[in-house]
Every structure is written in C-alpha cells, then in structure tokens.
Image (cartoon, helix red, strand yellow):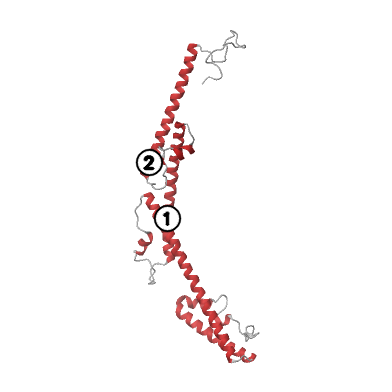
Amino acid sequence: STPGANSITGGKSFTSLTGGGGGGAYSTEKLLHRPSAAMRDSFQQLASQTAHQLEDIWDIVGIVPEERASQLADLVDRIASLCHEKIEQEEQLAEQFRKEIAEARFEWEECCTVLRIEEEDPVVKMKRDPSVGGGSGVGVSLQSEYEVMMSRLESIRLVREKATEDIVSSQRRIYEAYAALSGCTVEEVATSSAEMEAWADTSSNLTEEQRELFRSKAVDYEESVSSRTQAIVSLLVDCQNLIRELEIVPPGCDGKDENDTDGYVDVGQNEDDA
C-alpha cells in the first residue's frame, strides 16, 4: 500500500465506526438480542463508513483507482481471514468440550463397572427432561452436558476411591499376616506367592461383597498369626520350665557363678530366659 495511507484517519477514530467505545458496549447490546441481523447491520455500517473515509483519504493522497481496488480487496481478505480464525477457535472449543465429555463418560462407565452400579447415562437422562433446553430450540448445549457429566463423575469417583482404599487396606493386612506365617517379606508375598494370587486384584471388583471378602480373609490370617504366636510363646514357656526341672546347664557353661554364694548358676533364671 502507499506509505501514509493507513495512518491518516480523516479526523475519526476507529471506535466511532463500530457504534460505540468502551469495548463496543453499544454494539454488544444489539448483538445480544439479534445476533445475525445486528452483525449484518454492523458490518454494513462499518464497511460503508470505512469506504467513505478511505475514499476521502485517497482523494487527498492521490491514490489511483487500481491501487484503491487492490487495497480494498486486501482489506476484505483480512476481514474474511479474521472471521475464519474466529470460527476455527470456536470449533476447537466445541471439540474440546466433546473430548472432555467423552473422557468423563469413559471414566464414569469404568466406575460403574467396578462398583457393579447400574445407572442411566447422566446426559441421556438430562436430555429426556422436557424442562431442559431453555426453549432455544438447539437442544442441550455441550457446556450443560459437560457440567452434568462431571458432577456425576465426581460423586461416583469419591465412592470408587473410598472402596479402593478399603480393599487395598485389607489386602495389605492379608499380605503382612501371610508374610509373618511364611517367614518371608511382604514384597515376596506380593510377587511370588501362588496362594496370594486370589487377593492380588484390587481394581476390577470394588463391590461391598468383594471388600467384605477381603476383610474376612484378613481377619482369618491375623487370627492364625495370633494363634501361632500364642503357641510359640507357650512352647517356650514349657521349654523353660523343663530346663529348670531337669537342671540342664547350657552348653559352654560350667554351672558356677562367681557372684552366687553357693557358686552355681540358677539354671533357667538368667537374662536369656524367654
């Protein structure tokens, strides 16, 4: 374009061409109630005022008709490009909504599956409500679908998290008790014990019945540990009593104690007693 053509305003600001300043408040009010018609009228007014101002400027500068036509064509292309970019932005927004709704629905379905809950899709349920839609004639908006889907997902997600914590806690108790009974580590139990395979899955079934099964098994193993501990303690006590009765001297001990008046150790009554 000819130098100086874009810097001359002919005494009028750009905001005056849009029907108001302050962010276009006046035009926004019209666009709110009659979007298509208001937008058409605004473009017509903007195009007419812009053309008149440009013609005045070009007459002053002395721009030839061919150059004027070229600049106007370039301006139209730039406006069309701006409109196209805006449409693409809004399409991307809509696609993002669809993507996040699909992801939320997938997680909701997973939660329902592992919790064995049968319930209707929240969006489908909302669409069946005749009061939804606001009379706009366009059906349920993507934003409404997203809000409904996320609201239900957050609720069922909390249920799943609590159920998972419960069953994982029971699994840990099972592993620890089994490790104590088997004389190995919890890690070894979790990775190599065939008997523990039945208690390895803590994600595919989170029903109350499954969690109760885990809790019951944990109690069984813990009772076995308690019983075996009591048996071992009882055995040690019996052995100690037997040693005292038989007056058995431990290996490596001559049976004398320098600090004892009679010079002999009281077998079964030293610091190593169980």
Quarter of the image for residue 232 reads top left
Quarter of the image for residue 266 reads top right
Checking the image for residue 107, the label placed there is: 1
Cα–Cα span, label 1 and label 2: 25 Å
Give x and y (percent) for residue 237.
47, 19
Tell me the kind of residue under disc 2: Glu
Quarter of the image for residue 148 reads bottom left
Dot 1, crowdedness within 10 Å: few (<14), some or many (≥20)? some
Query: Viewed as shown, does residue 33 lie left or right of 19?
Result: left
Residue on which the image places disc 2: 212
Pointers 1 and 2 in contact (CB under 8 A)?
no
The answer to whether one can see residue 239 in this image is yes
| As drawn, 191 above or below 76 | above
The answer to whether one can see residue 152 in this image is no
- Helix or strand or loop: what does disc 1 sit on? helix
- Helix or strand or loop: what does disc 2 sit on? helix
Dot 2, crowdedness within 10 Å: few (<14), some or many (≥20)? some
